């Protein structure tokens, strides 16, 4: 059955819900966001991913209205947000600390925003009940925030920010305070709720796994700029820079010089060694320096040189990281370069083929690696 | 055993310095005035044995308490004290809350200095501070001189020896007791709560009413009791700054004791004052306990 792929960013007819137009934000002489332009579409689950201090939280706080834009414009549903205070925006935020009101019960916390709208009482009660059911909190309605667990608090915060049915929900590191197992469960819950309510979610996170799991698109940020915006699969398979490749998942970077071959490039990476062959849509001049990025799981490891391998290189196992289902082998090449190769542990540990100090062959196909300019 | 000693020390302290003196005062309040040293009767005669003790108990009565209800001076003094303490507490809250709020909003590096400034007046003797208010508030005092100089008034205002002077000085003296608990409640408040309130549709003002005030409630209650309880029995301020019509129970007590030398009636006044104070003290304790439960 053919399913229509959700990709409004590829549709020139689609109208974005949020538009950043050349947005710059400065604090004193520190530039937090630099000349940023980006569209976010309705019903998207958009992640802002980056190390701390990259400006992702600032970007979110500008959407919520807690920070003003220094230069440029932010449009939400076509309306300029410059002088709209937080309480007049159809935007709600889920805070990193949850910011639940400690003096109010779970029920009253969720009803807080609805009461400010001056809705009739039975309407508020109905909406709060709906939110309690959605987040599975019906039993805890009468409790105070300090009487429930961290995971429950997180759900109260989510219910409270969803109660007013905002056009846009901002989530600031929503799962940061939860332990790993609970975090994974909650990620799927979040996606489920996002789908049910049809709300646009913008989420800030520094956890790449979280961003990959939940997002329709991921924006990787660094020093106030967006480096790449793409679907999780594209970000992983076709990063546009070494920074993105390195930030998302594990990667081997080999520096070299490109030379045009029939349908790809030959990359000279060490003297006296056969160049690597790589196919790429990116264009390089002869003699231009480039970076070969290969994911460890795309590197095969074998005792003999595979006969049909396009790229093969010999090395010595320096270290083995055993992760249960897979093992990562750290292999040193002749020029001292370390390459990580992953192999599934299909056999029992005692019958492992390779061990420390073994000489092995690493190989990969001509399409496995990405060739990057920077 | 060690734990027992640890618990026993504060209790021994309370028994020796609170319960025993209270029992002595209670006993005097049940005695009669006498021209002797000490100026009341009966005295317990240890040599007379059991019969002497029974005789001693038989002479105790509630005459002084009945007397307090008959002379309107006393209950008027109690009511007036309650009124002055209540009004001063409200005034102190109105002055103290904005100060505590401003302190909690101040940059981190400023806070220790501001706290020090709040406590600084305690470094000067209380009496000296009361006397300096005489210098400020009297007809020829600094305040009147300043107002005459600016031309706001043409004749000096009579402030000293009125209730106004008493209010001014109670507010001044007890202000730190109001500021500190409110400040500590406001200071630990998470700033993102106000952002959350705004995000959910509150204006700045309604966020203040719906979030800041409820969350500083424990501090407000604690501050009010810390001001109200000592202000109720205040003696020095009304006697030095108040007028002849400023009626406060502390002053009445002093006069009974030192001017009339009627120890039994003075003790009865003190016992009633203590009973009045027990109510707010119990309420104060319950507020503290509730706050501790919230903080867990």
Image (spheres, rainbow, N blue to C red):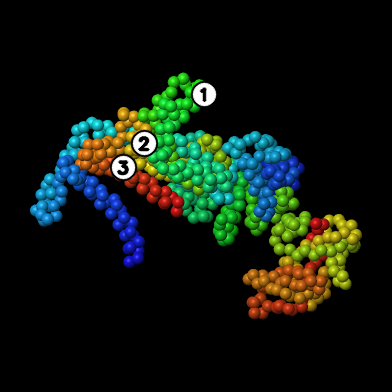
> CB under 8 Å between callouts 3 and 2?
no
User: In screen coordinates, is A275 left or right of A145?
Assistant: right
Is the residue B277 above or below the residue B48 in the image? above
User: Please, what secondary structure does the residue beneath circle 1 have?
Assistant: helix
Respond whether the residues carrying marks 3 and 2 are from the same subunit: yes
The residue lying at 30 percent from left, 44 percent from top is: B278
Residue drawn at x 73%, y 75% is: A317
Q: What chain letter is assigned to the residue under label 3?
A: B
Is A206 in front, or is B55? B55
Q: Which residue is mark 2?
A: B237
Q: Residue at x 36, y 45 (%)?
A: B284
Quote the CA–CA distance across marks 1 and 3: 44 Å
Does the image show residue A337? yes
Q: Which residue is mark 1?
A: B150
Label 2 SS: helix
Which mark sits nearer the N-terminus, 3 or 2? 2
């Amino acid at each position: 059955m053919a399913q229509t792929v959700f990709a409004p960013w590829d549709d020139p007819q689609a109208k974005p819900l949020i538009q950043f137009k050349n947005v710059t934000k400065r604090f004193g002489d520190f530039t937090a966001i630099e000349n940023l332009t980006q569209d976010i579409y309705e019903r998207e689950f958009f992640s802002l991913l980056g190390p701390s201090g990259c400006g992702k939280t600032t970007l979110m706080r500008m959407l919520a209205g807690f920070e003003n834009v220094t230069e440029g414009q932010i449009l939400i549903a076509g309306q300029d947000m410059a002088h709209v205070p937080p309480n007049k925006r159809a935007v709600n935020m889920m805070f990193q600390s949850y910011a639940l009101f400690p003096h109010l019960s779970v029920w009253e916390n969720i009803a807080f925003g609805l009461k400010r709208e001056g809705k009739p009482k039975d309407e508020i009660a109905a909406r709060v009940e709906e939110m309690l059911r959605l987040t599975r909190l019906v039993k805890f309605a009468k409790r105070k925030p300090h009487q429930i667990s961290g995971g429950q608090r997180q759900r109260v915060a989510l219910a409270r920010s969803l109660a007013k049915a905002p056009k846009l929900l901002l989530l600031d590191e929503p799962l940061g305070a939860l332990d790993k197992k609970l975090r994974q469960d909650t990620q799927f819950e979040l996606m489920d709720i996002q789908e049910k309510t049809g709300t646009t979610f913008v989420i800030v996170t520094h956890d790449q796994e979280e961003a990959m799991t939940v997002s329709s698109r991921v924006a990787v940020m660094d020093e106030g700029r967006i480096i790449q915006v793409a679907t999780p699969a594209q970000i992983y398979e076709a990063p546009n820079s070494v920074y993105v490749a390195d930030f998302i998942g594990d990667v081997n970077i080999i520096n070299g010089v490109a030379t045009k071959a029939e349908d790809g490039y030959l990359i000279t990476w060490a003297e006296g060694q056969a160049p690597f062959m790589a196919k790429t849509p990116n264009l390089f001049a002869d003699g231009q320096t480039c970076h070969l990025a290969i994911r460890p799981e795309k590197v095969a490891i074998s005792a003999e040189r595979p006969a049909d391998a396009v790229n093969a290189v010999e090395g010595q196992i320096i270290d083995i990281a055993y992760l249960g289902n897979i093992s990562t082998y750290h292999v040193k090449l002749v020029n001292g370069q370390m390459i990580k190769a992953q192999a599934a542990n299909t056999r029992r540990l005692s019958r492992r083929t390779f061990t420390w100090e073994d000489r092995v062959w690493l190989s990969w196909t001509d399409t496995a690696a990405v060739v990057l300019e920077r | 055993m060690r734990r027992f000693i640890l618990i026993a020390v504060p209790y021994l302290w309370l028994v020796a310095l609170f319960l025993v003196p209270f029992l002595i005062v209670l006993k005097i309040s049940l005695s009669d005035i006498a021209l002797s040293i000490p100026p009341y009767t009966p005295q317990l005669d240890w040599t007379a044995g059991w019969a002497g003790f029974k005789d001693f108990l038989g002479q105790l009565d509630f005459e002084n308490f009945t007397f307090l209800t008959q002379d309107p001076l006393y209950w008027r003094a109690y009511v007036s004290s309650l009124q002055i303490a209540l009004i001063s507490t409200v005034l102190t809250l109105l002055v103290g809350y904005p100060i505590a709020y401003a302190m909690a909003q101040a940059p981190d590096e400023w806070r220790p200095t501001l706290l020090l400034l709040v406590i600084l007046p305690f470094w000067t003797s209380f009496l000296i501070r009361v006397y300096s208010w005489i210098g400020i508030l009297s007809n020829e005092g600094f305040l009147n001189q300043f107002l005459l100089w600016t031309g706001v008034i043409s004749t000096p205002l009579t402030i000293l020896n009125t209730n106004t002077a008493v209010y001014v000085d109670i507010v001044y003296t007890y202000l730190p007791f109001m500021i500190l608990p409110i400040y500590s409640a406001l200071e630990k408040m998470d700033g993102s709560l106000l952002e959350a309130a705004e995000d959910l549709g509150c204006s700045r003002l309604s966020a203040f009413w719906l979030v800041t005030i409820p969350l500083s409630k424990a501090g407000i209650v604690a501050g009010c009791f810390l001001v109200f309880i000592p202000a109720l029995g205040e003696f020095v301020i009304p006697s030095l700054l108040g007028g002849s019509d400023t009626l406060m129970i502390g002053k009445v007590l002093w006069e009974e004791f030192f001017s009339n030398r009627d120890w039994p009636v003075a003790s009865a006044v003190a016992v009633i004052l203590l009973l009045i104070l027990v109510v707010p003290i119990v309420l104060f304790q319950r507020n503290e306990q509730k706050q501790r439960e919230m903080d867990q």
